[in-house]
Amino acid sequence: MVQTTFWALKKHFEGFPKLSDFELKEAELPALNNGDVLLESVFLSVDPYMRPYSKLRMKEGDVMIGSQVARVVESKDPAYPVGTFVVAAAGWITRFVSRGKDLQRMTPDWPKELPRSLALGTIGMPGLTAYFGLFEVCKIKAGDTVLINSAAGAVGSVAGQIAKLAGCEVVGCAGSDAKVAFLKNLGFDAAFNYKTVGSLAEALKKASPNGYDCFFDNVGGEFSSVVLEQMKKYGRIAVCGAISLYNDQEIQKGPYVQLLMIRNELRMEGFLVTQWENRKEEGLKALLKWVMEGKIKWEEYVTEGFKNMPAAFLGMLKGDNTGKAIIKV
């Protein structure tokens, strides 16, 4: 029998998650049947969506949800020989058995100069979220002014670079001076630390006096209400995330959006990247090409050790990471 280790959700989060909400457990995996493969985790991901979706999709005691890059270490499926690398939504677990249907095979000719962890970030779900959110929801075009909040994170940092490639002016907001410097290094036309400005409205106005054509929203809440007033006529808003609300125990009450949306004929659309599952390969090929050409830069915030996953998750929610938060087993 093969032993595995996993992090279980011991208790549903109340407010901001705590280390005590998780429990490290061990279990034995069954012997492989024909068609089974045994996989071992190499890199794991922590992402903001895990906070709200843990409540929606999980019971206490379940393996914590999440994706990982894993390697096949034993196989009874010729389609997945030993040594194959995959992306799997297996959760926070070190080894697992799969029938192969829930695995996304990584290309065998993955560039040697790129870490496979990028399949969890820039050339993975966060990159695809930026790609389709901009092109399909925001409908960006050359000359647009695009605003991105939480811009130094896994999605925002890629979104800003894609918008620049499309010929847009890009403004980014982040939570530290170091992250602002990071955004400027990526090519953002303007960036500011929203925590230190005297007035968010004035900072937005200074960054783009004529307003914004597109707003890629990762934050929600009061921040988004302020931005709404500076959208141009026929502006488009892609609602990707609402991290400012995830840990609230009481629902926030904010300004009502209808009058502003009517007056400026705005379009606001929430989206999940799974909507374009049938076009995933298109997006991944474009992202890989841009990375290899040096047109998209990537940054990872790596935590060593599976035992440190809960701490990495909490740190990500606090905004400790620049770029994609990754755990290396």
Image (tube, rainbow, N blue to C red):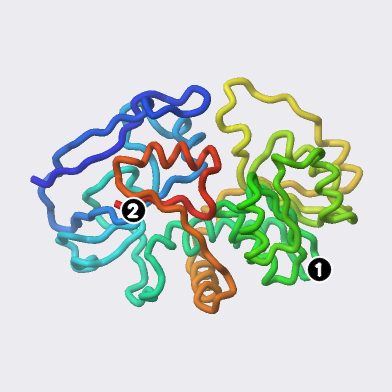
Which residue is painted at 62% across and 20% down in the image? 250
Three-letter code for the amino acid on which mark 1 is drawn:
Gly
Please, what secondary structure does the residue beneath circle 1 have? Answer: loop
Which residue was labeled with disc 1? 143
Q: Quadrant of residue 199?
A: top right
Q: In which quarter of the image is the N terminus?
A: top left
Q: Is residue 157 left or right of residue 222?
A: left
Residue situated furthest left in the rendering: 1
Which residue is painted at 36% across and 67% down in the image? 106
**Label 1 – label 2 distance at C-alpha:** 40 Å
Please, what secondary structure does the residue beneath circle 2 have? Answer: strand
Which residue was labeled with disc 2? 328
Which residue is painted at 10% across and 48% down in the image? 31
Where residue 294 is drawn, which disc sits there?
none
Which residue is painted at 81% across and 48% down in the image? 204
Residue 24 % position (x, y):
27, 33
Residue 103 % position (x, y):
33, 57
Residue 290 % position (x, y):
55, 74
Vertical position of residue 3 compared to residue 277: above or below: above
Three-letter code for the amino acid on which mark 2 is drawn:
Lys
Instruction: Between label 1 and label 2, give the one nearer the viewer.
Output: 2
Instruction: Give the camera-side residue of 234 and 109.
Output: 109
